[in-house]
Image (tube, helix red, strand yellow):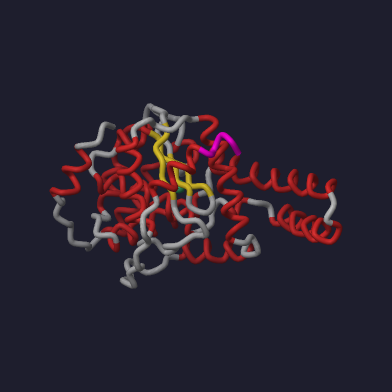
Amino acid sequence: MRKILPLFLLFAALLLAWGEASSQAFPPATRAERRVARMQQATANVSEPDEYRLGRAVAARVLAAYPLVRDPQLQLYVNEVGQAVARKSSRPRTFRGYHFAVLESAEPNAFAAPGGTILITRGLLKLCATEDELAAALAHEAAHVAHRDGINTIAKSRWAEVRAERRVAAAKERGGRAAAMASLFEGSINDVFKTMAANGYGRTAEWAADQEALRTLHRAGYNPGALATLLAKMVEQEKTEKRGIYRTHPPTALRLAKVKMQLKGLPPQAPQKVRDQRFKEQKI
Ligand SMILES: [Zn+2]
């Protein structure tokens, strides 16, 4: 717990007010998204407070591997962009809100812990040429939170055990049971961390996250095409870079092709000078 305290103090300072989600629909829900919605039902009994606790523990594991970037201005900026997209996602509110932070690592990567803690590495940030591309990367991660992809990796049977132990512990109110419960919870944390950091959520969840990211960007006033331009650069980088996001996501060229299909027929948005200027002011 002590390790994650500085992070959460930082997050507390960076929290912004929530906005209203736009009702604008773009594009319509896909088959991949509907499948994700069905999967969500499997772990629907994981409460929001439990999701938050699990997510905090998962984020702490990531932070044990990568330190936070010591640049408050950059952290604040990434939070502002992140909050702007998260509040336009399909899940604008979570139990304790969304939190964004930049990790000190050259490896291009991003993590979406359950409940809304989103971590992006400096390596992935460096790949972004505009604020819209940063927003695209964050919108993809916010979609993982909205779809509860992390929580959905917990084996159904494991969560059933947690619930059963909890009932026994509540009835007995005695020490030994509480310890057993904690170790069961540990198993769930391992499930989420392993999938998020090593295996990835799988193709269906990734396509759905890309598709939701396009809609989120559109609602938040960003150019959805930024997801395509970011992915195009990732396609190039993937040829030499096999770590991080490339290990946990489907081949980037396939993601790019799917995103381009979704973008077809949409008028390109003019780049906004204000956004480009504040992006350039950051020391990335
Ligand atoms: Zn993803």
Relative image position of residue 152 (x, y in whole percent): 59, 55
Q: Residue at x 46, y 34 (%)?
A: 244
Quarter-wise, where is residue 143 in the image? bottom left
Q: Which quadrant of the view contains residue 172? A: bottom right
Q: Is residue 262 left or right of residue 94?
A: left
State which quarter of the image contains the C terminus: top left
Between residues 4 and 163, which one lies in front from this camera angle? 4
In this rendering, the count of numbered labels is 0
User: In the displayed image of the protein, which residue is found farthest to the bottom?
Assistant: 23
Percent x, y of residue 241:
40, 28
Q: Residue at x 64, y 60 (%)?
A: 46
In the image, is residue 4 part of the stretch drawn in magenta? yes
As drawn, 212 above or below 2: below
In the rendered image, the quadrant that contains the N terminus is top right
Is most of the magenta stretch helix, strand or loop?
A: helix
Magenta highlight on residue 181: no
Image-quadrant location for residue 232? top left
Magenta span covers which residues? 1-5
- Please name the residue shown 80% across and 55% down the image: 165
**Nearer to me, 232 or 16:** 16
Front residue (pair 178, 26)? 178
Is residue 264 shown left or right of residue 202?
left
In the rendering, at what x and y percent does residue 20 appear? 35, 68
Please tell me which residue is depicted at 79% across the width and 44% down the height of the picture: 179
Is 142 situated above or below 199?
below
Q: Residue 81: image x %, image y %?
A: 31, 49
